[in-house]
């Protein structure tokens, strides 16, 4: 994948607000619904979401800038340090060697000197994955594999669990979707994502892990990430959206079109509506056990993009003849 900063069209020194604004503009432009005749629209939109997952998240952005993860959020392998040098926990820091044994309760260091903390070296090399492997199952042998794709396997006598990650859109999360996932063995399987799944939730597929000497296979554990949407934010079973309206719509009232995950609906704005007022659209949110959630549309009054002399003159007259104080209740 390309550099996420390049995908979003921002510099590495861009602030959070600039990054968010760039993402929203590009998301509206590249969304597959707005490019139905472009076969590459879906892949470009997915690339944009993946870039925002990195640059739009403060912790991931710092990790990427430090070179700890790549443009897809996967850990970078930097190799072993030290090899005869003065690196951290490097080989050759002392003469001799150390012996190690492992079993049901993990690795043990024997007596001797030399290579230093071997398990610490493995932890550094594999991003802490060794700990997951060392605590496989009671009575199981130790095994660990990391292929650089974000997928790890933990193996033992009775087989190992395989962990993988999968990204879906907010609309796919709401409606459910079937995705194909490639396992470390190269095998591809179809995974059915149920409707209403939240970001970070995990799906377990029995018997789709690695097979151990006993012939028993472990499970496949898939962590699902829901990519940010340019318009909607999820709040439990509800969705929230900022709804821009014109000044005259706020003053005089009117009917406006409101986007939902199922298409646009019409909403009547009463005359004299203030910015910040929230309207509830029943059944336009996420599916839940007790029924589908709602869409909460919060009004934001927007002035014209360009200065308008007629509006300016009207406001001057209003200020002179009908002045009022909207902050009278919050004064000291």
Image (spheres, helix red, strand yellow):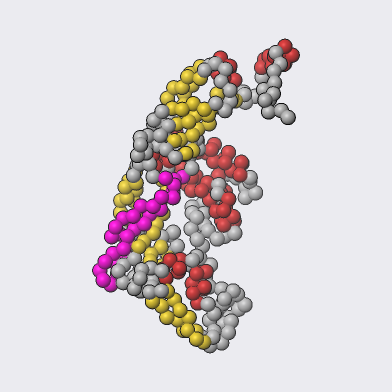
Q: Is residue 275 above or below residue 161?
A: above
- The quadrant of the picture occupied by the C terminus is top right
Rendered residue at 46%/35% (across/down): 239
Q: Is residue 106 above or below residue 13?
A: below
Rendered residue at 50%/61% (across/down): 75
* Residue stretch in magenta: 198-227
Whether residue 215 appears in magenta in the rendering, the answer is: yes
Percent x, y of residue 271: 54, 16
Instruction: Looking at the picture, tell me which residue is in the foreground, 104 or 77.
Output: 104
| Left or right: 124, with 315 as reference point | left
Rendered residue at 42%/80% (across/down): 101
**Residue at the extreme left:** 215
Q: Quadrant of residue 330?
A: top right
Percent x, y of residue 25: 54, 36
Q: How many marks?
A: 0
Question: What secondary structure characterizes most of the magenta part?
Answer: loop
């Amino acid at each position: 994948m390309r550099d996420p900063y390049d995908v979003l069209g921002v510099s590495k020194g861009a602030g959070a607000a600039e990054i968010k604004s760039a993402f929203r503009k590009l998301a509206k432009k590249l969304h597959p619904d707005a490019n139905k005749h472009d076969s590459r629209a879906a892949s470009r939109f997915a690339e944009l979401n993946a870039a925002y997952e990195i640059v739009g998240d403060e912790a991931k952005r710092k990790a990427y800038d430090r070179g700890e993860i790549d443009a897809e959020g996967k850990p970078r392998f930097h190799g072993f340090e030290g090899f005869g040098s003065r690196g951290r926990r490097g080989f050759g820091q002392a003469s001799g060697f150390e012996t190690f044994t492992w079993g049901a309760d993990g690795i043990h260091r024997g007596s001797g000197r030399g290579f230093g903390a071997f398990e610490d070296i493995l932890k550094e090399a594999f991003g802490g994955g060794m700990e997951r492997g060392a605590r496989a199952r009671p009575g199981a042998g130790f095994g660990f594999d990391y292929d650089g794709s974000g997928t790890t396997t933990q193996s033992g006598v009775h087989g190992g669990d395989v962990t993988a990650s999968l990204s879906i859109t907010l609309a796919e999360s709401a409606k459910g979707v079937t995705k194909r996932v490639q396992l470390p063995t190269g095998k591809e399987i179809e995974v059915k994502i149920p409707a209403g799944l939240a970001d970070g939730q995990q799906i377990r597929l029995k018997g789709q892990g690695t097979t151990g000497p006993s012939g028993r296979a472990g499970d496949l554990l898939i962590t699902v990430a829901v990519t940010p949407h340019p318009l909607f934010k999820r709040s439990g079973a509800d969705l929230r959206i900022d709804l821009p309206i014109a000044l005259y719509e706020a003053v005089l009232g009117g009917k406006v079109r409101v986007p939902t995950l199922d298409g646009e609906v019409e909403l009547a704005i009463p005359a004299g509506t203030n910015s910040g007022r929230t309207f509830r659209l029943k059944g336009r949110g996420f599916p839940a056990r007790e029924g589908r959630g709602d869409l909460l549309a919060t009004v934001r009054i927007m002035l014209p993009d360009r200065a308008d002399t007629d509006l300016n003159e009207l406001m001057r007259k209003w200020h002179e003849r009908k002045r009022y104080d909207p902050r009278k209740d919050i004064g000291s």
